[in-house]
């Protein structure tokens, strides 16, 4: 008996998003390595934690597809982009990535609405809320760097920014422990 409650189109879209989240994890890991190599330990730690959060998101998609009777497909993950040339480029790339991810999330929401797959629509609301937080976080990185002086920031300002991000709370939870109220 076929127990899959996802349309082939939605199953593929959810699998594609799972892979997109894995790619994001690799991208942020790569940026973290770049920051670490440049001596920005706090920024690197922040990016490493963000990489783990993106991986957790991919696991949420995987578990959802499996729970709905589908089988997620793991695709080859493209290499992360080249190292950024500056903190501005790094933070701008993080922001652009989050906006692109939001667009992808919205496509799945639209598809689930179109197909009247209310379980998937409801599942995706967690990600809609999460993307608001992710975009805000990325925008705050850009704003903090601008306040520090951007690419012309003094060593002291960059040191302060690095320490601020190093002491940011580590609120990355395991994917299976996340809820709508506690993403």
Image (cartoon, rainbow, N blue to C red):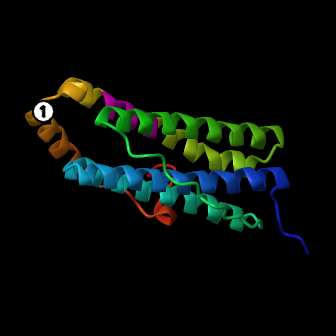
Q: Quick check: 147 above or below 135?
A: above
User: Quick one: 4 or 162, which is closer to the camera?
Assistant: 162
Q: Quadrant of residue 53?
A: bottom left
4 relative to 155 in the view: left or right: right
User: Quick one: 117 or 139, which is closer to the camera?
Assistant: 139
140 relative to 126 in the view: left or right: left
User: Quick one: 32 or 122, which is closer to the camera?
Assistant: 32
Residue 3, given in percent of the width and then of the height, sits at 84, 69
Instruction: Specify whether residue 136 is painted magenta.
Output: yes
130 relative to 75 in the view: left or right: left
| x 23%, y 45%: residue | 165
Residue 133 visible in this rendered orientation of the protein: no
Q: Could you tell me which secondary element the residue under label 1 belongs to?
A: helix
Residue 65, given in percent of the width and then of the height, sits at 70, 62
Q: Which residue is mark 1?
A: 157
| x 40%, y 32%: residue | 92
Range of residues picked out in magenta: 134-142
Instruction: Specify whether residue 182 is painted magenta.
Output: no
- The extreme left residue here reads 156
Q: Quadrant of residue 87?
A: top left
* Mark 1 neighbour density, 10 Å: few (under 14) some (14–19) many (20 or more): some
Quadrant of the frame with the N terminus: bottom right
Residue 162, given in percent of the width and then of the height, sits at 19, 43
Q: Quick check: 146 above or below 130?
A: above
48 relative to 105 in the view: left or right: left
């Amino acid at each position: 008996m076929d127990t899959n409650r996802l349309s082939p189109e939605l199953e593929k879209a959810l699998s594609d998003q799972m892979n997109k989240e894995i790619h994001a994890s690799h991208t942020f890991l790569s940026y973290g390595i770049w920051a670490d190599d440049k001596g920005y330990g706090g920024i690197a730690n922040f990016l490493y934690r963000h990489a783990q959060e993106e991986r957790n998101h991919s696991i949420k998609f995987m578990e959802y597809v499996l729970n709905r009777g589908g089988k997620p497909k793991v695709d080859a993950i493209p290499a992360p982009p080249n190292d950024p040339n500056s903190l501005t480029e790094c933070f701008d790339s993080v922001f652009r990535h989050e906006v692109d991810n939001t667009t992808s999330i919205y496509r799945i929401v639209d598809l689930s609405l179109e197909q009247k797959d209310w379980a998937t629509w409801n599942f995706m609301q967690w990600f809609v809320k999460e993307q608001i937080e992710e975009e805000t976080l990325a925008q705050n990185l850009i704003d903090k760097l601008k306040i520090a002086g951007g690419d012309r920031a003094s060593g002291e300002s960059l040191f302060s920014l690095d320490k601020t991000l190093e002491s940011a709370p580590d609120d990355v939870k395991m994917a299976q422990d996340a809820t709508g109220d506690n993403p």
